[in-house]
Amino acid sequence: MKGVNVQWFADLFHMKNLTSEIDLSVREITVSEINRPALQFCGYFEHFANERVQIVGMVEYAYLESLEPDKRKKAIEEFLAHDMPCMIFCRGLIPAEDFISLALKNNVAVLSTSHKTSSITAEIIRVLNEELAPCISIHGVLVDVYGEGLLIMGESGIGKSETALELIRRGHRLVTDDVVEIRKINERTLIGTSPDITRYFIELRGIGIIDVKALYGVECVKEKQSIDLVIKLEDWKKDNEYDRMGLEQEYTEFLGTKVVCHSLPIRPGRNLALICEAAAVNHRQKKMGYNAAKELCRRVQENLAKDS
């Protein structure tokens, strides 16, 4: 099972390792949910999700401090006897020496952060949801066009990279070329990123590899972007019928999530970058409640009603 390295996790949130004898780099977090162990400190371990990151806030800390020494030691021993990826004390709280000693004895990593419990909890869930999300890799180009994530797909050599380069020259931002890593953050959200090795590079046949960040500046690249619209480039065929109204949406599916998809036939003289821009703006307009095709149909129906 894919996991998040606890050392990377602790460094990301600038957490202090209170159990420095434990090597965080060999430990992993495998689930995105968190647990606040108030019930466990009270001795209730039924349905205890010990595989989750354990978050200790002011309430749990104050409860432990209020217990008599013997009861407190027993509660801590019972809790730390369970295997867990790590514990986090929030608000700059530092557990007593006996807690740290028992944590070391049971090989439980204990971290500390100065952040408030609610804020760090929300951020941890967000990061873990993204890092542990289901992921696939597909062939395509992902560009941020007016804030809409435009995934351009098509057969090799059809012009995806050239279209992306023209969009970049028009002020839009490249996320990734050739390989797009897609993560399903939730039931409605897909995030696209680039593999580290090819980040910000574009391959142009006849020229080779270019570095978009170096040539056009940091304002022309982006690390990740939601996938809002798919454009499939295909060779124009005389016998094929292409949608000219756009009344019915077509979709493609990634990881069980549907994304609006347009098939764009390629013919000499068509400005693909301009068409992609129009598609992105039109998609945003539809999300805001305005559909040009439906508006045209309404006007035609009103005109027919007047003539009848």
Image: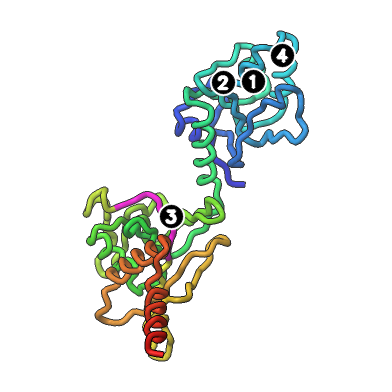
Give the residue number, with chain letter if any, for mark 1: 103
Q: CA distance from mark 2 to mark 4?
A: 18 Å
**At numbered mark 3, what does the secondary structure look like: helix, strand or loop?**
strand
Region rendered in magenta: 221-229
Which numbered disc, 4 or 1, marks the residue that appears first in the sequence? Answer: 4
Foreground: disc 1 or disc 3: 3
Give the residue number, with chain letter if any, for mark 2: 19
Q: Position of residue 259 (x, y in %)?
A: 49, 64
Give the residue number, with chain letter if any, for mark 3: 226
- Labelled pair 3, 4 in contact (Cβ < 8 Å): no
* Identity of the residue drawn at 54% across and 45% down: 129
Give the residue number, with chain letter if any, for mark 4: 73
**At numbered mark 1, what does the secondary structure look like: helix, strand or loop?**
helix
The three-letter code of the residue at mark 2 reads Thr
Crowding near the residue tagged with mark 4, few <14, some 14–19, many ≥20 C-alpha atoms within 10 Å:
some
Foreground: disc 2 or disc 3: 3
- Labelled pair 1, 2 in contact (Cβ < 8 Å): yes
Q: CA distance from mark 1 to mark 2?
A: 8 Å
Quadrant housing residue 46? top right
